[in-house]
Amino acid sequence: STEEFIDKFKLDYAIIGCSAIDDRGEFCDYDLREVRVTQAIIRHARSVILVTDSLKFDRSAPVRVGTLDDIDILVTDDGVKQDFIDLCKSFDVDIRIAHGPDSPAREER
C-alpha cells in the first residue's frame, strides 16, 4: 500500500540511503519491503540523492535497490576511494564529499 501511495506523487527530490554499495555502483539493502518503497520513490523523483557513509562500501546486503544510473547526486564522507569517485563520474553522478573537522581538505578552506 505504501508503493501505491507513492505512485500518486511526483517528487522534486528524493533523499535515499542504503545498507551497502559495491565497486560496480550497485546499492543494496536488507529488507525487501523497504527496497520496493525506495524503488518507487526513485521512479517518481526528478532528482535522486543517495546519502551513504564510506563504511557502506565495505559491506554487502542481499537485496538490490539500484545502480548509479538511478541517482543524480551521491553524498558521502571523505573515506571514499578514488576508484569509486571515478566510477561516479563515468555514470555522470555528481559526488559530494562531506569532509570531517580534521580533514586536510577542510583545513584548506
Image (cartoon, rainbow, N blue to C red):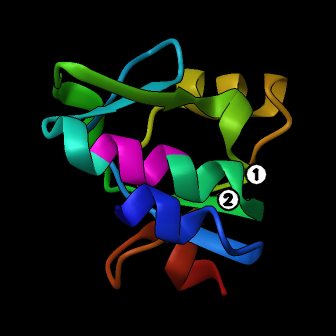
The local crowd at label 2, few if under 14, some if 14 to 19, many if 20 or more residues have their Cα within 10 Å, is many
Q: Alpha-carbon distance for marks 1 and 2?
A: 5 Å
Q: Amino acid at mark 1?
A: Asp
Locate residue 80: give its quadrant.
top left
| Relative vertical location of residue 17 with respect to residue 13 in this rendering, above or below | above
- Magenta range is 35-39
Q: Quadrant of residue 67?
A: top right
Q: Is the residue 64 above or below the residue 76 in the image?
A: above
- Along the line of sight, the residue nearer the viewer: 102 or 65: 65
Q: Which residue is mark 1?
A: 72
Q: Is residue 71 left or right of residue 17?
A: right
- Circle 1 SS class: loop
Marks 1 and 2, the one that precedes in the sequence: 2
Q: Nearer the viewer, residue 90 or 108?
A: 90
Residue positioned 26% across, 50% down in the render: 34
Q: Is residue 76 left or right of residue 69?
A: left
Can residue 27 be spotted in the picture? yes
Give 1 or 31, whichever is nearer the viewer: 1
Looking at this view, name the residue that lies furthest to the top.
24
